[in-house]
Image (cartoon, rainbow, N blue to C red):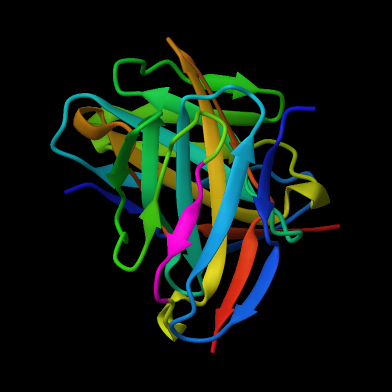
Amino acid sequence: EAQVTQNPRYLITVTGKKLTVTCSQNMNHEYMSWYRQDPGLGLRQIYYSMNVEVTDKGDVPEGYKVSRKEKRNFPLILESPSPNQTSLYFCASSLITGRIHRQFFGPGTRLTVL
Amino acid sequence: AQKVTQAQTEISVVEKEDVTLDCVYETRDTTYYLFWYKQPPSGELVFLIRRNSFDEQNEISGRYSWNFQKSTSSFNFTITASQVVDSAVYFCALSEGTNAGKSTFGDGTTLTVKP
């Protein structure tokens, strides 16, 4: 089954404790992306990756890092989480071939930083 | 800088009514991509469509249709004969051709379809 998985699904942590949210896709997609969703602020892109070893900033990259060492994985790293990073996070991967574009989202990770 | 405006914050209709969700965008690029997404009450995100700036043909998929008009910088989404299952938040998004991986979203329109 084609899917994007995220782990953990829920996480409560404390300020400053480094954490990683994993994202994995089994569709061999080149493009992957991270978004955060906050009430009143909608969806905002954090980082994206057009292919292995190619990553770039979205609209709100501050406080986050990513890596793309292999095609299937695109982890989101919070080196020193702060309460303003409390949010719902979505990972996505996309098939982009000519006119064809299909995007698949993970189920979301709800992060609370105390 | 790119910008997406979904002026309708909330829309409520009765089942079987047609409803149009508006999306207006701003970009300086001549090449860009427009998207629609659905987020039902369960919370997952669902990709609906991508349209590129060179393709102004309207698209129909079942009860869904999309009207792209470059002259008014709009990419509106119509649901025909709405159903309760269409109740969701719908997001419009834009990415510019010069940086096609970067997306900007509108604030979303919450659609409620009442039985």
Q: Nearer the viewer, residue B15 or B44?
A: B44
Q: Nearer the viewer, residue B64 or B89?
A: B89
Give the residue at the far left of this rendering. B28
Q: Nearer the viewer, residue A71 or B39?
A: A71
Please tell me in which quadrant of the rendered image residue B20 appears.
Answer: top right
Residue drawn 47% across the image and 37% down it: A32
Q: Is residue A30 magenta?
A: no
Q: Residue A37, how many percent across, how many down?
A: 51, 64
Give the residue at the far top of this rendering. A98
The residues colored magenta run A74-80
Q: Is residue A107 left or right of residue A31?
A: right
Whether residue A62 is visible, yes or no, is: yes
Give the residue at the far right of this rendering. B115
Whether residue B8 is visible, yes or no, is: no
Q: Residue B58, how many percent across, how many down?
A: 47, 20
Q: Is residue A75 magenta?
A: yes
Please determine whether, in this image, residue B61 is positioned above or below residue A104: above
Q: Residue B14, how many percent across, how many down?
A: 76, 56
Q: Nearer the viewer, residue B93 or B7?
A: B93
Residue drawn 32% across the image and 61% down it: A60
Q: Is residue B48 left or right of residue A86?
A: right
